Image (cartoon, rainbow, N blue to C red):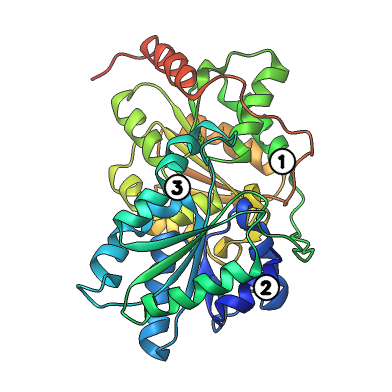
Amino acid sequence: MKVEKLVEIIGSDFYTGVPDSQLKALCNYLMATYGIDPHHHVIAANEGNCTALAAGYHLATGKIPVVYMQNSGEGNIINPVASLLNDKVYAIPIIFVVGWRGEPGIHDEPQHIYQGEVTVKLLEDMDIKPFVIGKDTTDDEVMTVMKEFRNVLATGKDVAFVIRKGALTDAPKVEYKNDNHMIREEIIKHIVKASGEDPIVSTTGKASRELFETRAANGQSHKYDFLTVGSMGHSSSIALGIAINKPEQRIWCVDGDGAVLMHMGSMAVLGSNKPKNLVHVVINNGAHETVGGMPTVAADIDLVGVAKACGYPYAVSVDCFEKLDKELEAAKERGELSLIEVKCSIGAREDLGRPTTTALENKQYFMEYLKTLSREK
């Protein structure tokens, strides 16, 4: 169905969410219609953040908000849904729009397979009444369901539209860009050169795909890298767990701005523990580029200041390759927890591939390599 028609049928004037490629039509429609407007459309740090923001909107206005997200974000909403929205607590009605990655029978990446299997069940377990919209779903069907949903919402319960691949059409074209000049894949090549045979933990999305292809182009083994293909926002915590238990081995974390924002509390834990052998590189293009390029708030915040406030002994921002190479080499010699923010452009090549090894193989190769490194304490 046309995305504009879905928005019309829902009839809400406030949307908040975390962008998803399956919902690109909706995201582009909201950006073309509202942009980022605190009264109508807010892209939040994570899905729990969106849910609480939407609850505040309802408390202030009495109106029903919409929260959009990829189904991988269902885990982030469980707490606020169960302990804030639920009709046994505050009975706050919200309409969720959920992109269904990993739908059974539809080929998808490994991180989406199990999530896809339990997507609808999780919603039902949270007492959120779901309706699935596919390519053949008619406007009349959605209008009929929305009438039923309004009765459910009136009781203080929540509802969800689950969006199948290709179900929403007629998205407006929106160009996402910034004024930065460094290309992420080139940044990753410089990190790979500097890191040598040190282990790298890379964040979800195109960064991990580009790291994989860089290794392939270099004729290098993939054993050096743990590709965090799912679990957005947790790469730095994985890297911390490794760094603590391999204290004589330098560990690199290649992170993204959207991922850092999603679970920024991990920076406080990193700063408190201060692993001397961890280099945290945050590639910041101010965008959720992997799912379409919609903006994050990272372009407007001082990540270096955040890192220092969290206790990082050293943090710096770079905007050219000369500075990047200098800081990468200095981080190797410093022997202190370091953060390097790299200002990055938006964009990736069209023929960017995906890892050809399975997630399980990636884990096994990586663990076997870690065993060959410095002894555990």
Q: Secondary structure at mark 1?
A: helix
Q: In this view, which residue lies farthest toward the top?
A: 372
Image coordinates for residue 88, horizontal then vertical, percent: 20, 72
**From the viewer's perspective, is 209 left or right of 226?**
right
Where residue 255 is drawn, which disc sits there? none
Image coordinates for residue 4, horizontal then vertical, percent: 69, 72
**From the viewer's perspective, is 88 left or right of 316?**
left
Image coordinates for residue 187, horizontal then vertical, percent: 68, 38
Q: Which residue is mark 1?
A: 321
Residue type for callout 2? Lys
Looking at the image, tell me whether mark 2 or mark 1 is earlier in sequence order.
Answer: 2
Where residue 5 is drawn, which disc sits there? 2
Image coordinates for residue 198, horizontal then vertical, percent: 50, 21
Please tell me whether mark 2 or mark 1 is closer to you in this view.
2
**Residue that appears at 69% across and 61% down:** 25
Picture quadrant of residue 278: top left
- Front residue of this view, candidates 272 and 124: 124
Check the image and report above or below for 277 versus 307.
Answer: above
- Front residue of this view, candidates 260 and 142: 142
Q: Secondary structure at mark 2?
A: helix
**Do the numbered discs 2 and 3 sit on residues whose CB atoms are within 8 Å?**
no
**Label 1: how many residues lie within 10 Å, few (<14), some (14-19) or many (20+)?**
some
On-image quarter of the N terminus: bottom right
Q: Is residue 7 visible?
A: yes
Looking at the image, tell me whether mark 2 or mark 3 is earlier in sequence order.
Answer: 2
Residue type for callout 3? Gly
- Front residue of this view, candidates 24 and 311: 24
Picture quadrant of residue 188: top right
**Residue that appears at 57% across and 68% down:** 142
Residue type for callout 1? Phe
Q: Which residue is mark 3?
A: 233
Spatial CA distance of label 2 from label 3 is: 33 Å
